Amino acid sequence: MRILLIFTAVCTHAADWPTYRGDDARSGVSLEQLNLPLEQSWVHQPLHAPRPAWRGPAKADLYNKQFNLKNRQLFDHAFHVIADGQSVYFGSSADDQVHCLDFNSGKKRWSYFTEGPVRFAPTLYEGRLFVGSDDGYAYCLSTDGKLIWKKMLSPREYRIVGNNRMISAWPLRTGILVKDGVAYAGAGMFPKEGVHIVAFDPKNGTDRWRTIQNSWPFQGYLLLSENRVYVPTGRSNPIVYNRNNGKLVADLSGSSDTFTLIEWNGKPLPNPRQNSRVLGVFDEGNGDSFATFTGNHMIVADGKSYLHANGELSVLDRMRYLKLERDYKVQAAKREQLAKALAQLRKQKSPEVPKVQQQLILSGQALGEIQKGIDNCVLWKTPCNQSYAMILSGNMLFAGGNNEIVAYSANDGNKAWSAPVNGRALGIAVAHGRLLVSTDKGTIHCFKSK
Amino acid sequence: MKKLLAILLLFSLNLSAAEEGLLHQWRFDQTKNGKVPAKIGNPAYYSGAVQLIKENGLSRLQLKGTDRRVWVTDDFNTVKVPQKAITVEAWVSPTHPMQWGGIAGVIQDNGDYERGWLLGYDENRKFSFALASEGHKRLTYLKGTTDFKDNFWYHVVGTYDGKSLKVFVNGQLEATEEQHSGNIIYPPKATFELGSYKDENENHRGTISLHEVSIYEKALSAEAITKRFKARKNELPLPPEPLTFSSYPQLRWKNRGTLQIEWELHDPLPVEIEWKRTGEAKTRNLKAKTDKKGLALIGQIQSEGEHLYRLTARNQAGATFASEWYKFDTSFYYRLPPKPKRPNPFLDDSKMKMAASAAKSILSKDSINQGYALVIGSAEGRLAYELAKQTELQVVVVEPDKTKAEAARNALAQAGLYGNRVSVHQRDLNDLPYGPYFANLITSGSMLGEGSLPVEDASQLMQLLRPAGGILMLGHMSGKLNGQLIKSWLKKTGVQCTVSQNDEGIWAYVKRPKLEGAGDWTHQYGSADNTTNSRDDLVRGEMEILWWGEPGPRPMPDRGGRNPAPLAANGRMFVQGDRVLFGLDAYNGTVLWTFFSPEMRRSNMPRDGSNMVATDDTLFISIGSECIALDAQTGKRRLSIKTPKDREVGWASATNKQLLTTTVKPGSEYRADVGEWYDAAKKASDIARMVSDSLVSHDSVTGKQQWSYQGGAVMNSTITIAEEIIYFVESRNAKLSQSSSSRVAPAELTSQYLVALNSVSGEKLWEKPVNFSKCENMLYLIHSQGTLIVSGSDQNKHYHIYAYDVSSPALRFGTENPEIQELWRESATGSDKDRKRFKHHGGHLQHPLVVGQTLYSDWRAFDLRSGDRKKDITVPPRRGCGNMAASNHSMFYRNHSQTVWNLDTGTTTILQGSRTGCWLGMIPAQGLMLAPESSGGCSCDKGDISIQTSAAWIPKASLFRFKKDQ
């Protein structure tokens, strides 16, 4: 699974959960502090479980002896929700509708039919809902379920069988994000037919810019940074567009499970010793930087990286880690220079050899000390069998597992609360004092403080 | 006192061991600081996350084939190793087979420099002992006969006494070899490795558990080995006797939670079936009655996951028999989600009764139950409701009126059918936005009640109707329309229409025939003539996506094994995964049926033939000793043809009347289960050829045997049928009949003959001595227009092509002295530049194609009859391991992504984003380019392979065919 996250400074935006993982950066971070323990407030069981577009990946790459390949296309395996304190909204890949539930009771308020599966959570922006559908349309709805406008993102109205449903040949499978008065969405599957990324006016759907490319499909939740649009491409790595003009900035290279956009606008880069763990840095005026780790989810907040791998949850003191990594780099360079110098001196049979040799030994010791420090940057780690989803709300990490949702203290990793849910907890949201959990069986659980 | 006794006992054991020549012994029951202490001799070391497991009183060290390693020393010279004689004894439990599996060894195997010794195991589940001696400086891998089962314990011993090499398994001597003599010879330096195969340039990390390994500097006697086995055999769970089948288990879905399993044994036995989810300990089981044939339902299976199952039986004498732990996966369930039980949202009024009656009439006319239905005009959703309720169809309703569309949606959502089963699109009926061919059924709700023709232009509907059996059935029950009007409306489409009228109303019925000009892909290389050409005239020019969907990569075998090609006939496609087979609607991708069988696997097509072949109505699949005929639409078993005892089905070919099969020795076929690519030019384990010892003809409907041929060793990759003549190349090397395997090294395929048989009578028409020994990597035979082409490549990857004229009518009647003119031969190697363009792995394995008068081999094109190089044709360079596949106008191949070469214009188009596997994954047939998913296992993440899905592409020229025809 791959998730892009932007490191967002702690901010005090309203306690809505207006889009997938809470914000344009898909940070999965909320300032809300839920008072534990929680109790189930209501549960919504739709008639149909999600009908995902894609099943699992191949079981193994036998040639390269890689087993348990990860599913990179999990975006629609649960009905991910958004919420605004009045309502909870979600789209359904099974009944093609956008649904609205009462925030307090979970009872149906309204639903709206599109003409194809709705695989992505809506986005709430300035009192309007923005929804994409496999029918190829972007929909703008009022919060009482009335159509304000709809816009076909595809170049023409053409429907064929795709993932065993009759859908547009250009399904809208990025969700829609809106920022600074501009909406963004992508549509298209087979690059030969042209795949579109479109910036449009959220008021009426008018194109601001549109870029058509023939290299990648667009599938997965969009992510926005200050200057860029990051577009997941299904099982390939994301590509990056300039947010202002739609120019392609880069396609990210490298192979990894999870990566996070942690800094941008020319701020210092993560240490080069991350090596394969750094996906890439782009310089088009300002650079965004990435870090990856082998695991399921990563949340970067408050100078810490919360790492969620199979069977383990851990926290890295990221700032200290970065400093030590920089120190390591300086010391390693110094050591290399010493080694070169020593080789030269030996050739010359110089009397300086023992002195430099000693310096080299000291340098190696210093490097070892730094490495110890790096190893100690893990503030805590704890066994965690809930590997399907993770968010950070206040000082609690909520992790979704098989038939359970569990809270861990972000301070020390202690298990603070848990509750049963129906199925694999793949989606977690927090809004207005409620915890909302979506499972692969389509169930949406709402929990509140006792 | 006790301590003193223990010390004395230990001393005495050590003394005893030394007397017996025991140099090293490791019992894997403790590890400390990266070290495994030795009972005798030097300790072993480990790195990586090696796991020491103690359960049920038994300890073992588990290696998982990843980054883990156990070794004694990186330089064997630093420890004592046997010189004149050796015994390597081990208690091991392999997790799964490996091409190069090691248990213990000090080895260097470079092909031309072979030293040391190795106790190991292979991909064919055999244990082996290899050793190089002064008298024979080659590592000969002497193999045992036991087929090991995963995760069971075996006592494996290899001995060498200065003369004989021996392999013992579970106390029994299984193989002896007398080639060696003198001392063991070692390389100057080599690692002393445990649990893996490692030499200076190869490191095959083992997937095995080790309990104990011992090295002696003497050859233990058979008696001593048996004694040692018996002394400990009750401590370790040894495998039960294998349960043998005359028909391997076959599984089919009954519903999402239930699989039907059937099997046949050689003898009637009471069978118990156990199953569990992979990774879970808890098993469930059920008992079947005592019989040879068995049928049972495995129920309440968890969805979306891999499961293991096995069959066990006990005979009257109390002996227990067990099959392997086989697999099925509940995520390979591609039927529609269930229909919730909800009340009918419509009033039980005359309109509802009319819709129910109409649905009944429509569905009783043909047995259409799966795929897509298109309903023109909603009838407020009533007709769609009835169709969805009574079938597994996905119904698409088009309704121009917004209010009616909304009403239909609400009603159908209330019924729990909206989305998964029915969708309503609000559209102008005369501007339908759908791609061609998707609808298995087209009907009309508006015509039914209101009496209006569904659309102005009937050709618009015909374009959407699935070829080869799609049904247009339009009814009207209120008397506004007459038959003549409907006929007239349909007339300009040119289709055959039947109009019937009775008291209940009028019905127009059209069944769309096959597409004229469309070709089939019924055999591995298109048809039985092996030309790799479907002769499809429709597949040409620019292509556009038509559908995509299941199966995805999960059920498919790893992409590299050179797996059997998909097949397509009569509007259906057949896709073979890893022990799972799918029947699909070729025009809309609906998975019609799924069939699991644990021994259904074939790979390395360049050295064998496929295990499946299709006709219009039947898919024949070879599994073990039987060739099973499955109904092409339902996947149900029609009949089974079995081989004689101790033989399995090899190659097969079929028509509507005849089924031809060959027999091979059991366990010979390639399976690519450990990631083999089979593309090394000199590797014996890649290039050995599958040969058959008989060719048998059956009536394909009744299964009755018609004739059989037994001559030499018939090379499966050469069997070619054209114009009722079967051609093949066979070797008459008499030694081959003594071999235990049908997999034969090319060098042994001496005394070659090109043979022709009459396919109807089996009579030999002629034979011709030939010598195709230059074709070392593979040998292909194809027939086109009276020309036989033989091709292959040598170990330097140079192609050799031979063309023979078999067009003489006289040859059809048989002759002892055939005049078969060699038309031309070509052994040119091409320029370095040419070859570099095609050097990617498998570039030397290309199967030739014929389109028109042109033979395409490797990177060159030739005139079929004259052999003149067609230098005006530039075969596009490709970086890929796959083989090309042709229609009459285009070729399809794996480059970085799927690619089309337009033969009419010479241009290429990349179908960016999807890739096929390393053989033949795209087939131009049924008027489409069909590309079921075959890239699975490729874990790279480039845009070239961003979509892993099954898909069909349609020529743009076919998009508006009906409109063009007018």
Image (tube, coloured by chain):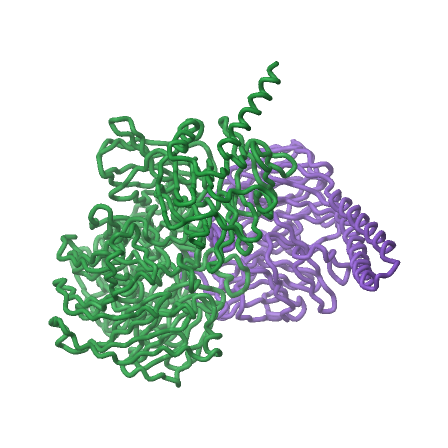
Decide which of B788, B949 is in the foreground and name it: B788
**In which quadrant will I find the C terminus of chain B?**
bottom left
Q: Is residue B374 visible?
A: no
Work out whether B163 lies above or below B280: below
Q: Is residue B219 left or right of residue B42?
A: left
The answer to whether any part of residue A410 appears in the image is: yes
Which residue occupies the foreground of this view, B57 or A227? B57
**In the image: residue B34, left or right of residue B181:** right
Identify which residue, B427 or B945, lies in the foreground. B945
Q: Quadrant of residue A142?
A: bottom right
Residue at the spot 40% in from the left edge and 73% down from the top edge: B798
Q: Residue B587 in the image: state x and y as whole percent.
A: 34, 63
Colour chain B appears in: green
Residue with the most extreme top position:
B1
Residue B66 location in percent, x, y?
55, 47
In the image, taking residue B489 as reference, residue A105 lies left or right, namely right
Determine whether A339 is above or below A198 in the image.
above
Q: According to the rendering, which colour does chain A have?
A: purple
